[in-house]
Amino acid sequence: MVLQSGRIREILDVESARSKYPNAVWLEFPTHVMLPGLINMHTHSAMTLLRGYADDLELNTWLRDHIWPAEKRWLSPEFVRDGTELAIAEMLRCGTTCFSEMYFFPETIADVVDQAGMRACIGSPIIEFETAWASGFDQYFEKAMRLRADLRGHERLTMALAPHAAYTVTDSMLERIAEASSRYDLCVHMHLLEIAWEIQHSLQEFNERPLKRLQRLGLLNHRFLAVHMAHLSDDDIESLAANEVNVIHCPESNLKLASGFCPVAKLQSAGVNVAVGTDGAASNNNLDLVGELRTAALLAKGLAGDPCAVDAATAIEMVTINAAKALGLEGSIGSIETGKSADLCAIDLEWPETQPVHHVLSQVVYAASSRQVSDVWVQGQRLLKEGHLMTLDVPGIRDRAKNWNRRMGVQA
Ligand SMILES: [Zn+2]
């Protein structure tokens, strides 16, 4: 593979490359598999600082009695900066080159991602109640539009509108979000059908199931990123396929919070584009997409009662090209092709855990661990080199995380 100016210029055999590009700088990875950079389609990066803060709890209790009060107390640009840096360090070490984010102070997140050299789609959050970042819908919306203007034309950063969930955003807010999404061609990134209670709530409040409501409000289309989708009827699946909605599956978060099961094999049979996210570290508790990939493949087989469901190649597609399609970036990332951005991840298969290599993709999905990720490039820039992060101050990131632990502990 020949890289030039951050792009994949040509893919050819070693001998031809040596004669055609005699002056090129050579890097050799004889024991590695080179994959497109992995894409984490749903996370709340700064929640790394809440990793292990409230575990083994029911979802509503976890969210309303622990996570939201902690955020109310601690949320600030400093918290978001330190937490996002920690998240990026972890994600790069696990082979992730791009992530789809949803958290407060998105302009701070954008700064951190930019400085690290990573790629992201920054979801600007919208929720009906006041937070340290915004006072109400008008301010959330205005700040989202400002972020859109600030990031326009950026090579590695895009933005999305990120209404929190169907039960925390009103009809009139969702209508304005749908209108802006269509006018500016923006993805809408939203938690949906994570818990069964959402269906009862929607039937009581709006006399229709959540997906019907979102369709009425003009949100169901190819720009919609529906995160979780653990409570789907057959009619819902048909509607998702007909409207070209993208489903973002977060298997480990759903398992940990016992939310339910996203029927990945059924969705794929119906033609729905399914990608994978880790969710935040407060409900996972890591951002390891290599591990998430394996969980997604195994869970899909178990749930479908079919060992052929989600084979290794399909699982890899879920964290690469399917994710790129969901973000509307399939023309530039998500696969190793001439002309695409050089966003790459090298996994060393020489480890005893992945020997012998009968089938490369099977080894990656079913046997490899993220510890075997040695190198990562985004737009041709080597951000992880032989296991070392090149653009981040790791001791500083660790010290700041420890400092948050001390501060939060004192107040608890
Ligand atoms: Zn989430």
Image: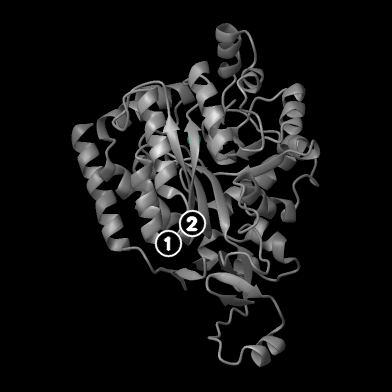
In front of the other: 226 or 291: 226
Question: Can residue 307 be seen by looking at this rendering?
Answer: yes
In terms of image quadrants, where is residue 175? top right
Residue located 67% across and 49% down the image: 322
Under circle 1, the secondary element is loop
In front of the other: 395 or 54: 395
Residue indicated by mark 1: 117
Residue 286 lies, with reference to residue 103, above or below; the image says below
* Amino acid at pointer 2: Arg
Per the model, the C-alpha gap separating discs 1 and 2 is: 8 Å
Residue 157: % across, % down: 47, 52
* Amino acid at pointer 1: Gly
Residue 275 lies, with reference to residue 63, above or below; the image says below
Q: Assign the N terminus to one quadrant of the image.
A: bottom right
Residue located 61% across and 61% down the image: 368
Residue 301: % across, % down: 74, 42
In front of the other: 302 or 289: 289
Total of numbered circles in the picture? 2
Residue indicated by mark 2: 156
Direction left: furthest residue: 410
Residue 81 lies, with reference to residue 216, above or below; the image says below
Q: How is the image coloured?
A: one colour
Q: Is the Cβ of the residue at disc 1 closer than 8 Å to that at disc 2?
A: yes
Q: Residues within 10 Å of mark 1 (few under 14, many from 20)?
A: some
Residue located 58% across and 64% down the image: 341
Under circle 2, the secondary element is loop
In terms of image quadrants, where is residue 208? top right
Residue 212: % across, % down: 66, 18
Residue 116: % across, % down: 39, 60
